[in-house]
Amino acid sequence: MSDTTSLYQPGILEGVPRVARYVQFTLAGEQQPAQALKEALTRASPLVNGRDVVIGISPALVHALGGQVPGLHDMPDFSGKLKVPATPGQLWCWVRGDDLGDLLHVTRQLQKALAPAFTLRHVVDAFRHRHDDATGFGRDLTGFEDGTENPRGDEALAAAFAQGQGDGLDGASFVAVQQWVHDLDAFDRMPEQDQNHCIGRRLSDNEEIEDAPEFAHVKRTAQESFEPEAFVLRRSMPWLASTQAGLMFVAFGRSFDAFEAQMRRMAGQDDGIVDGVFKLSRPVTGAYFWCPPMRAGQLDLRRLGFD
Ligand code: HEM
């Protein structure tokens, strides 16, 4: 593949941080002049190094700025038998680090830089759960290891970043973000075998269960089973707020195609079989963003009309 190194926001490729905040900004008023949006993004840019803060821009915001990004569109409605809400946003920031207090201050700096054109709409605090430094994997709050089948090395680069599309596009990533709320009481009530069958792996040792039912999550989403193969780079994290908790599902792709193929099958749109994950969780938000590439250590916003 062509060299996308140094073109992508590095936080995407790095593992999941110890703590993070998913921060969504919205437009302060219906009609914001493109110039005001541009000025706000220019002020925020120095805070976004792509590592400590990864940024994603919505289709609507790209449009409002007068930009064009081929393949960028809103999340479709995947609802069928179940609700899979599409809740479009404007600006998405994945604020990453080791200390939640520090992340609060980064959030405040972003808020100030983006005002008055943007206002903060929603923050979700996330963390690693039972992370194993040796394997680099953490767990979902159900206890299942998350990330096992993520592509690695060059395969991760090929899955997550656009290439061969030209300046200002190569190194960009298309991210799908969905907040899932777990029903941990329902999960706790299930016999262990049913818990294992929801995912298709054994909680005890993470082994894949060959004869798992067709609804098993890893059977539904097996990346090689799609035509064409549907690989994404998942960077999901557990979240909690007061008594609610779940998984912030985050998948980076060179386009939205792989995520869409997986989500359609999970929702039962291919064969009527709904993914076992819905027995223990439900999505309450869903949005797509374009994560612009980097150039000389700064966000490359040329496709949005910036110099
Ligand atoms: C509450 C929501 C979810 C939970 C708790 C969850 C959990 C898991 C777990 C435990 C695994 C097995 C280990 C691994 O390979 O990471 C897995 C695999 C996977 N999940 Fe999810 N997941 C959720 C939602 C989703 C969604 C919405 C998608 C995409 C639309 C997705 C795509 C995948 C993929 C592609 C794999 C790897 C499949 C393979 O190639 O073996 N997951 N997930």
Image (cartoon, rainbow, N blue to C red):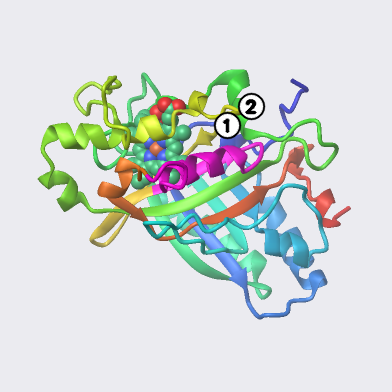
Quick check: 253 left or right of 166?
A: left
Residue 56, x across and y down, in percent: 63, 52
- Please, what is the three-letter code of the amino acid marked with disc 2? Leu
Q: Quadrant of ligand 1?
A: top left
Residue named by callout 2: 157
Badge 1: residue crowd in 10 Å (few <14, some 14–19, many ≥20):
some
The answer for how far apart the CA atoms under marks 1 and 2 are is: 8 Å
Residue lying furthest front in this view?
Answer: 271
- Please, what is the three-letter code of the amino acid marked with disc 1? Leu
Using the rendered image of the protein, determine whether residue 171 is visible from the camera's viewpoint.
yes
Q: Is residue 189 above or below residue 133?
A: below
Q: Are marks 1 and 2 in contact (CB under 8 Å)?
A: yes
**Residue at image point 49% right, 26% down:** 225
Q: Quadrant of residue 215?
A: top left
Is residue 251 found inside the magenta-colored segment of the image? yes
Q: Is residue 303 above or below residue 212?
A: below
Residue 34, x across and y down, in percent: 80, 70
**Quarter holding the N terminus?**
top right
The span shown in magenta is 248-272
**Residue at image point 27% right, 59% down:** 244
Residue 219, x across and y down, in percent: 37, 30
Residue named by callout 1: 13
Instruction: Tell which of 122 and 176 is nearer to you.
Output: 176
Instruction: Tell which of 228 and 296 is nearer to you.
Output: 228
- Tell me which numbered mark, 1 or 2, is placed earlier along the sequence: 1
Q: Is residue 47 above or below residue 265?
A: below
Q: Is residue 190 above or below residue 31?
A: above
Is residue 290 found inside the magenta-colored segment of the image? no
Q: Is mark 1 within 8 Å of ligand 1?
A: no
Badge 2: residue crowd in 10 Å (few <14, some 14–19, many ≥20):
many
Kindly state the secondary structure of the residue where label 2 is placed.
helix
